Image: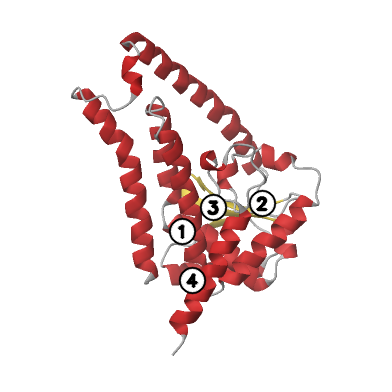
Amino acid sequence: MNHNKISFYYDLGAFILLALPVSMYILKLFGYELMPFGMLSLDKKILALAGGIVLGILYFMIKYTRFHNITKTIAKSQDFPEVFTIIEKLCREMEIGVPEVGFLESSIPNAFVYKHRNKPVVVLTIPLIEILDDKELETVLAHELAHIKNKDMELRKYSLLLRFALFLNPLIHLIEPFVSRSREYLADETAAWMTNAPKKLASALLKIEEYTSSYKDLRFSTSVPPEVFFFEWGFCAPYILSRSPSTEKRVKRLIFLSSRMTICSSP
């Protein structure tokens, strides 16, 4: 199947899933109560909504303040010409603008993308560059650029806004993490198709997991919102509430994708 079609189906699925709780809320305004929360009185609903929004705001203020403090230490120029060469090549192939590139001193190999003054910035930690070979590094960079191409940062903001605005609807607490996980899968697939190297992306994930599991100091991971990472450390919440798929599931999908790509390229 054409990768553009795959991307379209991912986008359509995300739209339908995120529209579902909104539709339920609209129906509720017209007197169709589809969830048991209709038993709550209006004042209790308002109190619960206000309390949830306040807690959400406090949570993100703490998390993203720490994240902002970390971004202050990002160096915008380092002696890694190979990184800039790979990014420029991938951006041409993806038909997107070249983002800013930053490097972060950390003991943990990882990468993430965020927006600074409405311009995307791709950030790599130094160990990531050191432990991956050139092709593995290319696939990781392609994954991060795929988030930009697929407009995942905007979708993440919208889905989180819905989660807080409609938090009395239990479906949104399952839908929002599911959509987030699906965007990681889409970024993996986009990177695999762009680089024609799904096994190399799987290899990069396994290398990072092996390196990280042997490292005891994970303070960096707890200081940053986990959903921004290329690789996420072990998460205590149930999988259905996690915004990132496990390394095992990502690797299995990439290996399966590799076999599909092999069949498609066969004469």
Mark 2 and mark 4 lie on one chain; the one further toward the N terminus is 2
- Residue indicated by mark 3: 121
Question: What is the number of the mark on residue 173?
Answer: none
Q: Residues within 10 Å of mark 2 (few under 14, many from 20)?
A: few
Please identify, in this view, whether the residue under mark 3 or under mark 2 is nearer the observer: 3
Left or right of residue 151: residue 106:
right
41, above or below 77, in the image: above
Mark 4 and mark 3 lie on one chain; the one further toward the N terminus is 3
Give the structural element (helix, strand or loop) at label 2: loop
Give the structural element (helix, strand or loop) at label 1: helix
Please identify, in this view, whether the residue under mark 2 or under mark 4 is nearer the observer: 4
Give the structural element (helix, strand or loop) at label 3: strand
Q: Which amino acid type is shown beneath numbered disc 2?
A: Ala
Quadrant for the C terminus, please: bottom left
Please identify, in this view, whether the residue under mark 1 or under mark 2 is nearer the observer: 1
Q: Which amino acid type is shown beneath numbered disc 1?
A: Leu
Give the structural element (helix, strand or loop) at label 4: helix
| Mark 3 and mark 2: Cα distance apart in space | 11 Å
Mark 1 and mark 2 lie on one chain; the one further toward the N terminus is 2
Question: What is the number of the mark on residue 194?
Answer: 4
| Mark 4 and mark 1: Cα distance apart in space | 12 Å
Task: Kindly check if marks 4 and 1 are in contact, taking CB atoms under 8 A apart as contact.
Answer: no
Q: Which amino acid type is shown beneath numbered disc 3?
A: Val
Mark 3 and mark 1 lie on one chain; the one further toward the N terminus is 3
Q: Residues within 10 Å of mark 1 (few under 14, many from 20)?
A: many
Between 94 and 172, the one nearer to me in the picture:
172
- Residue indicated by mark 2: 75
Quadrant in which residue 96 is drawn: bottom left
- Residue indicated by mark 1: 186
